[in-house]
Amino acid sequence: MSLLPTPVPVTWRLIPALSLLAGSLTAQAPAAAPAPPVPAHDSTTIVRGLYVNRFKAQNAKNMRHLIELADSTEINAFVIDIKDEFGLNYATKDTMARRNAGHAGVIADLHGLLDTLKAHHILPIARIVVFKDSVTARVHPKWIIRAPDGSPWHDKQGLTWVNPYHRELWEYNIRVAEEVVKLGFGEVQFDYIRFPEPYHSLPAQVFPGAGKEAKPAVLASFLTAARARLSKLGARTTADIFGLVTTVPGALEVGQQWEALSPATDVLLPMVYPSHYPRGAFGLAKPNADPYAVVHSALTRARERDAKLGLAGHASPADSSTHPVDHVRAWLQAFSIGRPKYGPVEIEAQKRAVYDAGYDSWVLWEPGSRYDAFRPALEPTLVSRRKWPPVTRHDSLAAKKDSAAKKDSTARKDSTVKKDSTAKPDSTARPQASARTPSSRRSTSSAVV
């Protein structure tokens, strides 16, 4: 029996067999009107996306390959680097933004790329790195975090960070967001919405102009200001946060706190990477080895905290066919740190955890934007998979124990068959052995539920 609910077709998502543009996406931009802004998707929209780094986005061949992957699977969104640690990834016409452009190249024909994504029904999401911005820090030394002696503060990599309390810095980032939305991006995803880690081995951080405003408050104020302006353009405002934010009751030292940031965004994206949780998290000796348990536990806590804020994330609990308002969209781990090596099985486990927690949307993060190895974990079409009511942690653990018991029982029967076949060979060993394979497969697929 399937571990997932009966698929609910998502009618707005059509997957046409459109041919890719023959021309290069990085060729000289034609003299044509820019693509109209993609209107904000309604509250029932399911987003299943891939992260596309700046260099992949600049390469026409790579983009054609990623579009082909989306056309043949459930993927319907790309999170594209538009402003990262290296500066801007597009040719801006804003004089304020142009000073901070950097020198790492740009997407030569952004209009053409956005037109292509629109033709293939792929939602373009602009990733904008905000406060880890060494390019802007060099150009605007008055905008940076300081050390107690007044010198520029540097992190462990020697990078300078900009000061989240500086309002002119806010204006710059919001103007970049507004410009790319007008070009055709349907959603803006702000990343590094945080302060740098205050390691004891580094000097204290000084924030000119901070006054008495707490870190979580200023981060929320930035997102609120951005959201007010972007919503007028029909775009959704989202933000990335550490996965630990869903479970830590107070604010992290970097300023992220669930209750402060969740109401300030249309969608919050916790990075619930199992490899990033310490031993013992959620009662797990090795969190990285149990991706289902980590993702399910983290998202369940997020849903509970949103409910207390009046952001329950669903439209009609009584109607299991009604899609939820996915106010939480998880970043899933599509990379390996330590053991086990992550592949399709681990992606499937994380996806199942998202659905069991009552959500439908997720995004895969692979730093190099290489996803071919994970293709077997992607469904051929986009259908709703979320469970409502959600699977509780108690139910999840019970299912896991039941699966383990079945696996142990199967192993004991197999051991008995082997002993019997050694003592008196007959035909009974063959059916037992053949029955063992599907039983093992079922227990393997359900062991992390």
Image: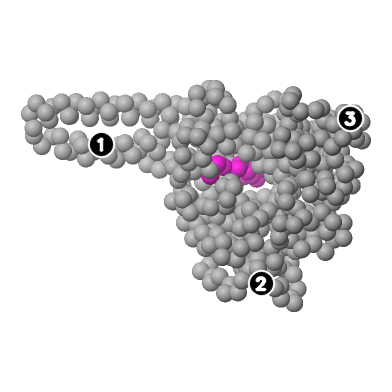
Q: Is residue 327 magenta?
A: yes
Residue 158 falls in image quadrant: top right
Q: Give the residues in magenta.
A: 324-334
Residue at point 58% right, 30% down?
277
Relative image position of residue 300 (x, y in whole percent): 59, 32
Residue 405 appears in the figure? yes
Marks 1 and 2, how far apart at CA:
57 Å
- Front of the two marks 1 and 2: 2
In this view, the residue in front, 274 or 370, is: 370
- Front of the two marks 1 and 3: 3
Q: Amino acid at mark 3?
A: Asp
Q: Amino acid at mark 2?
A: Ala
Residue 400 falls in image quadrant: top left
Q: Looking at the image, is 338 positioned above or below residue 231?
A: above
Q: Earlier in the sequence, mark 1 or mark 2?
A: 2
Q: How many marks?
A: 3
Q: Is residue 255 left or right of residue 213?
A: left
- The residue under label 3 is 149
- The residue under label 1 is 436
Secondary structure under badge 3?
Answer: loop
Q: Earlier in the sequence, mark 3 or mark 2?
A: 2
Marks 3 and 2, how far apart at CA:
49 Å
- The residue under label 2 is 27
